[in-house]
Amino acid sequence: MLDRIRIVLVQTYHPGNIGATARAMKTMGLNDLVLVNPRQFPDEDATRLAAGATDVIDDCRVVPTLPEAIEDCVQVIGASARLRSLPLPCYHDPERMMVDAWQRLPDGPVAIVFGRERYGLTNEEIGHCTHQVNIPANPAYGVLNLSQAVQIVAYEAFRQASRQSLAPAPKAARGPYPSAEQLEHFHAHLHRALDIAGFLTQPHAKTEAHLRALFARAEPNRKEISILRGVLSALERTGPAGGGDDIERSTD
Ligand code: SAH
C-alpha cells in the first residue's frame, strides 16, 4: 500500500529540497514522487541530496499543473503551515491523517501536496484538495523545511503500514471514493448548472470555493456523486423557470 501514497511538490524553488524529499521518502518505503512545474530539475543538487535515493528522482513524474498530478487520487491532502480561511476538513495530527488515508487506499492513490518554500500553496491549489494537514509545531515558529515536512508525513505512512501488516483494516463501508478527476467533473457540471440558472451573479463572491469546501466535508462516495450529477442533469433539462418551482414543491 505504501506505493499508493503519492508525494506532490508544487513549484519547488531549491532543487536540493527535491533530492532531500526523495531521500525522506525512500527511507520510509515511499516511491511515488510527482513534481509540479519545478524551477530547476533535473539538477546536480537534487541528485547530491538524494544520496542513495536517486532512483526516486529518476522515476519521478514532472507535470505542468496540480490537477494533472492528482487526477487519479481518491484523497488529496494539502500540507500547510498556516490555517486557511476555507473550511476544508483539516487534520492537526499526521498520524490520524494516515489512519484515514489507509481506509481509502483500496480505492486508489492518496496524494499529499506540499507547497513552495517561500509562500506555500495558493488558495486555488488548496481548492483542488479534499483535506488539509497541519504538522503541529512551535507556535512561535512552526514552518518546517519542505523535505522535513515530507519526512514527518512519510514516517507516519511507514508506521501505519507496519501497524496494518499486523492487523489489516476492514475495507471502509462508505467507499469507493471518487477520484480527483471525477470530483472536478462534478464541480464543472455544478458550475455550468449554476451559471445557466443565473445563480453566479458575483464571480468574486467565493461561492464556488465555499461549495467545494462543503462537498469536501461531506465526502460523497462515487455513487453519491453520480446521483448529484443526475440531479444536475435533470435540473438542466427542466430549465431555470420550471426548475425553481420543482425545488419548492419537493420540500413538501
Ligand atoms: N512560507 C510558506 C511555508 C513554506 S514551507 C508558508 O507560509 O506557507 C514549504 C512547505 O512545507 C509548505 O507549503 C507545506 O506544504 C510544508 N510545511 C512546512 N511546515 C509545515 C507544517 N507545520 N505543517 C504542514 N506542512 C508544512
Image (cartoon, rainbow, N blue to C red):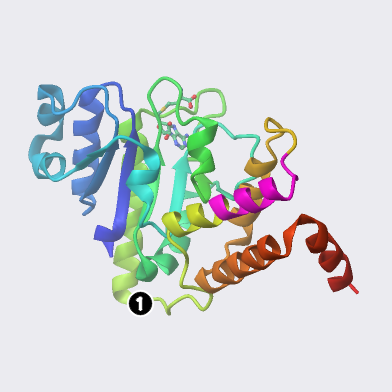
In the rendered view, tell whether residue 205 sits above or below residue 39: below
In magenta, the rendered stretch is 188-200
In the rendered view, tell whether residue 102 sits above or below residue 150: below
Q: Quadrant of the C terminus?
A: bottom right
Side of 231 where 152 appears, left or right: left
- The residue drawn where x is 82% and y is 65% is 247
Position of residue 96 measured from the top left corner of the image (x, y, whole percent): 49, 57
In the rendered view, tell whether residue 211 sits above or below residue 108: above
- The residue drawn where x is 12% and y is 42% is 53
Position of residue 9 measured from the top left corner of the image (x, y, whole percent): 32, 36
- The residue drawn where x is 34% and y is 68% is 163
Occupied quadrant, residue 171: bottom left
Taking the image in four quarters, ligand 1 sits in the one at: top left
Occupied quadrant, residue 56: top left
Residue pointed to by mark 1: 168
Residue positioned most to the right: 252
